[in-house]
Amino acid sequence: MSKQLKQLGDDIWKNQVEKINSELFTLTYGSVVAQLCKDLDNNYDQVNNELYKMGYNIGVRLIDEFLQKTQLSRCTNMHETAEVVSKIGFKIFLNITPTVSHWTADNKSFGLILVENPLADFVELPNTEARKKLWYSNVLCGVLKGCLEMVQLDCDVSFLQDSLKGDENTEIRVKLNKILKDEIPAGEE
Amino acid sequence: MSYYFAILGTNDAPVYELEIGTYRQSGNGVPHLPNELQELEQFILNSSLDILQDNQFKDTGLFSKNLDSFYGYKILSYLTQGNGKFLIMTDLKNHDESIRQFFIEIHELYVRNLLNPFYEINQPIRSADFDTRVRALAKRYL
Amino acid sequence: MPIYSFYLISKSGSLLYQKDFHSQNSPISKQNSNDYLVIASTLHGVHAIASKLTPEEAMGNYEKSRLPTNSNRFGLQCITTAKFKIFIHQTTTGLKLILFTSNDVSLIQATQLQGQLYKSYADYVLKNPFYRLDMPIRFRLFDDKVLTVVTGYNA
């Protein structure tokens, strides 16, 4: 199963995805974050929020692109969801494959460890306050939140650690709150 | 035997400076610049900028090994295409080639630093990481 | 194998987009805009009802319900009349793509075309930063794209 997903992710990345220069991408995202910090007077909590909202708006749109390219149907459990997010989602949009780890006993919460993070190339956080509060790549959490919500998985998504801050890894935590049963389109239960 | 190294931004404002001794000739990297020279070093480098500007559109190379001199100290320069200036003042002789190598590596660091979205051009470089890397390069080449 | 009309219906059943394509002796007469809304919401309701008619043994059994033979997971896929066919495809997010076609179009062909139209939707609607989700779609680029896809198919 996991191997098939990897294969599918690789194929789509190779054949169906438009690619852009990664430095242009990194710098664009970088100037967005830097400008947000400036506009919000370095209120990093607020910057995190804005990034999250931006990501959310991307996510609710991106999911259709994802489904169209992959032709996947609904996942049966969170383990499958985690694999799909990592091996296909991250692969086709960012060309990285985070490691899925740290499952909780109830199988509802897992971590995605980003070995490399294309958003954060060249970045060095400006001061200790930023190092304490700013989740530089918080847009990713928003995207995941938006995507998962559109397929009726109500999740909490947040960064647990970030190597930009001097942490050991970069880890995104995904926690399933509930499946929005009422909103599942008829025929998809 | 010591070096004074400075990076000046596109508007000639200083963005980074470092005093460092040589690691050659059994040096240990501690600078031995005379006091009176330490007080003057910024002036000396800045005054040599005039020559640099005169040569800017004459020379095609980025590196100049005999830009200026001041009582036995000579000044070497490296001008990036984006008008950033790297200057070194030293009393060491015959080390031009390794200083050139040093500048080339610094150029890469300088560009990487510019790519950091939180760095604004011509602002002082306060990154500790940048400083460590420059010192490591100094150890290797100077 | 002409395509007569194309509808996009949101998850909640509202009509997002409707387009009639010019075709000689189309059996579908021109409707007024209110009728389009009625058609859209009716199909939405019928689709929901159809999907509830799932055979007992496939209920709650994911593996079985994946098999199209004994399940109604996709609700309603095709309605055939004497003069035309209606193909309905629902995506995982709940978007419905509906095609009115002539009788000689097969389910496979329709699915393929719906796939292309889905791609156009993902590209030209969702990636348009000024599009607000679940609002009616009025973009010339999308119009053009739909027309290209459909005429490419009609030709």
Image: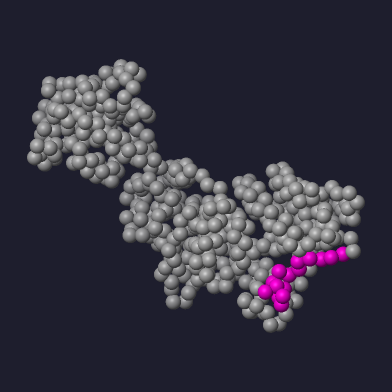
**Position of residue C31 in the picture relative to residue B76 (left or right):** right
Q: Nearer the viewer, residue A31 or C95?
A: C95
Seen at 41% across and 62% down, the residue is A113
Residue range in magenta is C67-81
Residue A154 point in image, percent of width and height:
55, 66
When asked about the image quadrant of residue B48, the answer is top left
Seen at 47% across and 76% down, the residue is A106
Q: From where the camera sits, is residue B39 visible?
A: no
Residue A125 point in image, percent of width and height:
36, 48
Seen at 44% across and 66% down, the residue is A100
Q: Nearer the viewer, residue A43 or C151?
A: C151
Task: Work out whether C47 lies above or below B28.
Answer: below
Task: Work out whether A13 lies above or below B20.
Answer: below
Q: Residue furthest bottom?
A: C57
Residue A87 point in image, percent of width and height:
49, 62
**Position of residue B79 in the picture relative to residue A78 (left or right):** left
SS assignment for the magenta stretch, majority: loop
**Position of residue A79 in the picture relative to residue C121 (left or right):** left
Q: From where the camera sits, is residue C20 visible?
A: yes
